[in-house]
Structures are given as C-alpha cells and as structure tokens.
Image (cartoon, rainbow, N blue to C red):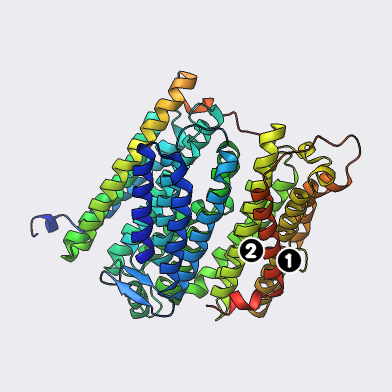
Amino acid sequence: MPNLQIIPLDYYIIFCSALFAIGVVGVLVKRNALVIFMSIELMLNSANLLLAAFSAYRNDPAGQIFVFFIMVVAAAEVAIGLALLVMIYRSTHTIDINVLNKLKW
Amino acid sequence: MKAIIALSILAVLNMFFGVRKMKKVLLPLIFIGLIITMILNISDWGKSVHYFNEMFIADNFSIAFSSVLILIGILIFMFANIYYKGVERPLEDIYALILFAIIGGIVMASFGNLILFFVGLETLSISFYVLAGSKKFDIASNEAAMKYFLTGSFATGFLLFGIALVYGVSGSFNLEAINTYILGCNGNVPMIFIAGMLLIFIGMSFKIAAVPFHFWSPDVYTGSPTLITAFMTTAGKVASIAAFYRLITIAFISLHSELTTTLTVIAVLTIIVGNLSAVYQDNLKRMFAYSGVAQSGYLLMALIVLGPKSAGILLFFVLSYVIATITAFAVLMLIREERGTFFIPAFRGLAKNNPVEAFAMAIAMMSLAGIPPLAGFMAKYNLFVLTAEGGYTWLVVVAVIGSMISIYFYFKPILASYFSEGEPQHKIESSVNFKINILVLSILMILLGFLPQVIINLL
C-alpha cells in the first residue's frame, strides 16, 4: 500500500496513543454511563487503528484479521453494556453512575 | 479442542431443551455432558497436539487447567438446584452462559496466539458480565454487573493496546515468534515493546484482581448472585492465572528476569492489602472477595520463581482453592437461603443443629487459611518452598505474615458455629444429597493434603 506509507508510522503511533489517552481520561473523569461507553469504544478503536497501521506497514494481514475480531467483540460488549444500562435505568431512572453506590462498605 | 466442541454442543442442546420447557432434563444432561467433556479432555493427555496453525495448543498444562475448569463446572451445577430452589423457569440461559464461560476459560488455558487469547478472555468476560446481572430485578446485582462491565472493558482496552504495540514491534501474534523476536534483540528490546508488555500485564492484573487494580472485585462479588460469585471467583481466577502463566513462560520468558521486580511488588501488595482488608469485613461474601484478592497474590508468587515444578504447584494451589471456595460458598448459600443474611451471626450454633454443614465449612475455611494437614496448607507450603529456593526469602516472610493474618478472618465463621455463646439458631433443613456432596468435598480436601505430590508431579 504505497499511498498509506507517505505518512510516517510514528504519526500513527502518536495519534493512536493520543486517542487511547483521551479514552482513558474519559472513562476516569466522566460520570455519564453512555459517555463512558463511548470512551471505552475510543480505547478499543485506537487499538484497531494501530493494528491496521502496523499491518499495512509490515505487509502482514494478521493485524487486520485481529481488527475484525476486535470489532465483533466490541459489538457484543456494547450490546451487553446497553442492556445493563437499560436495567439500571429501569430501577433508578438515571444513567449517572454515581447512583451505583449501594455496595460500598 | 474436543472439550470445546463437546461443551458448545452441550450448551446449545441445553438451550434447545430449555426453550421446549423440559426443565427436568437440563441438569442430568449437563452432568452427563460435562463428564463426557472431562473424559474427552483427558484423552489427549501427553500428546501435545497443535491446532489451527499453532493457534490452539493442547499440551499437558492446558489439559490440566481445562480439567480444573470443567471440574468447577461440575461442582457449580451440583449446587445449582439448591441455589435456584423454587424457581419455575428452566434457567437454560444461565446454565448456557456458565458453559460458555468455561469454554472461554479453556481457550485461555490453551492459546498459542494472542488473537485466540483475546477471544477466549472476552468469551469468559462477556459471559461473566451477564451472569453477574442475572438477578434482573435486584438493584445490587444490576450494580455489580454494571461495575464489572465498566472495569472489565476498561481493562480490555489496556490489554488490546498492549497487544497492538507488541504486534507492531515483533510482527507476529504467535507466542513462540514473539519469544524469537526478543531473543533476536540481544538485550536491546525497544521501549515500545516494553510498554506494550506492561499494558498487557495491567489488563491481566485487572482480570485476576491483583492489587492496584482490585477495587472492582469486592463490589462485584458482593452484588452478584451467590452461586455466580462462587463460579466467578474460581473460574475467572483459574483461567486468568493459566493465561498469565502461559504468556510469561512462552512469550516473555527471555525478559523474565527484568519482570520479576514488577511481579514481586504486585504480589506483595496484593497479599498485604487483600488480607488486611478482609479482616474488617463482616459480610462473608465481601470477605471472600478480599480473601480472593489475597489468594491472587499467592498465585502470582508462582510466576516469580519459575522452576520445573512451578506449573504443578500452581495447579495444586488452584485445585485446593477451587474445592475449598466452592464448599464454603455452598454452605453459605444454604445459610443465606434460611437466615436471609451473609453476616457472621447467621452461623451461631450451626455445629449443634447442622454438624455436617458446620464441619464442611470448618474444613473449607481451614484449608483456605492453610492449616495442616489440609490441601490449602500443602499448596502454600510447596509454593513457599519454591519461592524460598529461588532466593526470595523476604517474599516468603511477607506471605507467611499474610497467611497468619488470614487465620483471623477465616476462623470467624468457625468460632461462631462451634463456640458462640447465646441461643443457637434453629435447624436448617438440607437434603441428604447436599450433605453427601459437601462431605465428599471435605474428604477430598483432607486427602489432597496427604497426597500433594500426585497432582504436583503431573506437570
């Protein structure tokens, strides 16, 4: 893929690390469950992009195959997460995760 | 591989019979299926077959740990009818999820490629998220599932980014190829590879609840349904430690001497924090969560000193932990059913009215605390000897102090059931079947204490 290699690999690594860091900060700072889901997706997708970039630079398809696996798993995870969110919303009528404090000691 | 295929067929059959509302068929079917799976699994012993271009490796290590996972399944289903007594629904969804989680665990014990490692981990974790929330209208269960989901997928993010970095530098997902790459570096491994490896370790530490990343486990284990808690503490820990051991001994073995410092710090923190936090718990389920954290610390010790015996000792430790924990949780389930609480006073006078249950609980707790001559003691003894021989005497000292602290909280329910003052609580009715089950498990714990070499020399 010659067109892709015009952009140096370092740029991809820096960009993906930045995306990953934004995702981590989002999970740690935000209190809305939906925004946390989005941040987790951002973390997973930064890994996807990194794998795709490495795979293109190495001319090795394994990385791109792994991306498909990650996408499938991420879809399953979001399905579960949204179902759990609906359950929480039914009993508390909010999606703020600060209501999840019944189990503290 | 045969075990995975058999378990998948079993889970689908189980859902089919569940949809047809044939509730009576389900548990016998699952028992027969699990026993067949166990036989199929053990039939590959000693052959070391490699499937799918080195993706799935069925060597003795993976077969042994898969057997432990299938054993966990059998023990959990043994007590399923006690926990779900009075539920009209066939419950095929919960049974199927438990079976799928075991499949994930088996994949985690036998991967030869990081892709399969990730798939196995997620099969296990996604089943766990749903199982934790399987008490749909209980807010505590909802909360446990949500917390588990958020922390679990957060950890998955770290793990994936780490795998991506390791792949980018080494150019392969294959564990052997990664090791070949490290050897080819001649000691100058790039920083980015180290970063990826550490991210993978952070993800794994989340999964086995090692200390800086253990904060989710008490809440999740307290809120989940008790049977599921017993399953998650045992199966999750066994599968994750097996995967961790595989990663370290195959892919990162050449970097092991640099890794020991990190692992030692994590192990020491895990043992100290887990045991000290467990001291303050009155809720037994929460106490088990913290003691599980401490046990993860002991398990990590087996990864620090890698000798020829360490896989066998890890297997024996895991087996004794599994049997003791499930026995204790079975008695706990019974008591919760009758007395409606997980707190220590519920055990008052148990020995007078329910001697069998009190005996099994006492044996299980003493095994977990490491009192000779039970299985837990032999497991800890062999582990500590291995660590001391590797030159980590101070680590052994810390671990022994941790065990001594743990005696205090493990003995709380024993003291309450045998020596408590005041009016004993009324008798709990339990079936003969249940009594036989927990007695057999107790005898197994005593027997394993006398014959540890049988298990340790397997690997």
Which chain hosts label 1? B
Q: Which of the marked residues, 2 or 1, is nearer the chain's N terminus?
A: 2
Q: Position of residue B122 (x, y in %)?
A: 38, 51
Which chain hosts label 2? B
Q: Position of residue B275 (x, y in %)?
A: 70, 52
The secondary structure type at the circle numbered 2 is: helix
The residue sitting at 60% across, 72% down in the picture is B313
Tell me the amino acid under the disc marked 1. Answer: Leu
* Label 1 Cα crowd, 10 Å radius (few <14 / some 14-19 / many 20+): many
Q: Position of residue A74 (x, y in %)?
A: 31, 44
* Residue at the disc numbered 1: B374
Left or right of B394? Residue B59 is left
* Residue at the disc numbered 2: B320
Left or right of B291? Residue B19 is left
Pointer 2 with pointer 1, Cβ within 8 A: yes
Q: Quadrant of residue B268?
A: bottom right
* Label 2 Cα crowd, 10 Å radius (few <14 / some 14-19 / many 20+): many
Tell me the amino acid under the disc marked 2. Answer: Ser
Q: How many marks?
A: 2
Residue B27 lies, with reference to residue B49, above or below; the image says above
Q: Along the line of sight, which residue is nearer the eye, B257 or B98?
A: B98
